[in-house]
Image (cartoon, grey):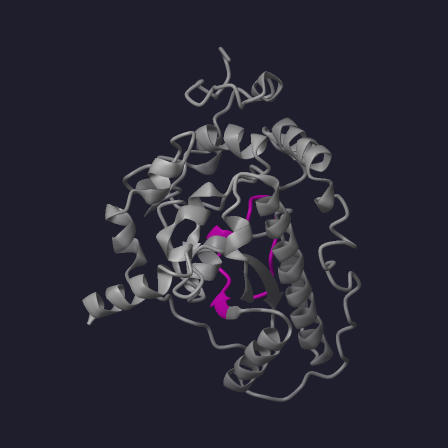
Amino acid sequence: MTGHAFDGRVLDATIDPEQLSLFPEISGNTINGLGEAQVRPPSPIYWQDPRSLAHGQLQNWMLEKTRRDVPEIMEMRHGLGGRGNEERAPVAEHRAEGTAAGFTTQVKAYALSAEADDVGIARMQPEWIYEGHTVDLPNVIIVLVQMDHAELAAAPYPPSVVEVMRQYNRGTRAARAVADWIRQHGFQAIPHGGPVGGPLVMVPAAIAAGLGELGKHGSIIHRRFGSSFRLAAVLTDMPLEVDTPDAFGADGFCENCQVCSRACPPDAIADHKQTVRGVEKWYVDFDRCVPYFNQTYGCGICIAVCPWSRPEVGPKLLQKMLRRLK
């Protein structure tokens, strides 16, 4: 791997040499802005058009391996529950009358009736929007769908990725349903669901929308679902009231917990926060993570073993943390 960003620290019998030969010279951590002191929009790195990505060949390699080894996910559009209507409802000619508070109550109730397990709202921030994308709608609705933790716990084996894709589909269905409901009320709404990346990074938007705290493993920890969930989004100009971040003690817990970092096969999870694009935060080493991530259909070990994700542990942790915050 001389001349490439990957440094060989995770090279073992499970990592295909063909994959390693596809690593670009630039480090994924550099693209992500690790160590940068200034706030800036994120740069596309994965789950975007591979032709525009330094790591595009790696992304293609991972997707081809997954399609070959896990055929259940090959027809996501029609299998695993489907992704809902692809065509959007027309925007009604006249806008419905109402207040931001009223619309907020209605849209959250509708989202929860349309397969979402939780929903939050945030004001769009420019630092969430990927370079090369433009978002001119002021609000983002984040919908959350819970995963079956027993299936997730199979990570890094195929049942886990099948469950992940099933819930990406459910999140997409929920986002599309919410977007159509908003459009029928006369407002603009654009839905987005994974796994393919959209115009914005959903994790910071979801944190701002009150759906949890960032965990050491780089994923959000929700007070009820731990990290066993997936996200989708709806961008809209419907007047809405925004939520506030939900701090319940997960961040402090992560400072002392070693479960995910010890369980990570490529040792990609740091024990301390780092500066990324001007923000001090938990950060997972991209160059260490991605070879194993690719080889194992998206891995997921770190969120599966997270104590907050385990149904028999998470609620007890929440009660303990809330007592400490009083």
> How would you classify the magenta stretch by its main secondary structure?
loop
**243 over 32 or under it: above or below:** below
Q: Is residue 235 left or right of residue 38?
A: right
Which residue: 38% across, 41% down?
Answer: 283
Is residue 11 among the parts visible in the rendering?
Answer: yes
Q: Nearer the viewer, residue 39 or 264?
A: 264
Front one among 72 and 101: 72
Whole-percent x and y of residue 215? 37, 50
Task: Please provide percent x and percent y for residue 33.
Answer: 43, 37
Number of callouts: 0
Q: Quadrant of residue 325?
A: bottom left
Q: Residue at x 68, y 64 (%)?
A: 173
Q: Is residue 248 visible?
A: no
Q: Where is the C terminus found, in terms of image quarters? A: bottom left
User: Which residue lies most toward the bottom here?
Assistant: 97
Residue 218 vs residue 299, the one in the foreground:
299
Horizontal side, residue 111 vs residue 322: left or right: right
Residue 225 at x, y percent in the picture = 45, 62
Query: Which segment is the magenta one?
Result: 120-138
Q: Confirm whether the magenta stretch covers residue 122.
A: yes
Image point (62%, 61%), residue name? 171
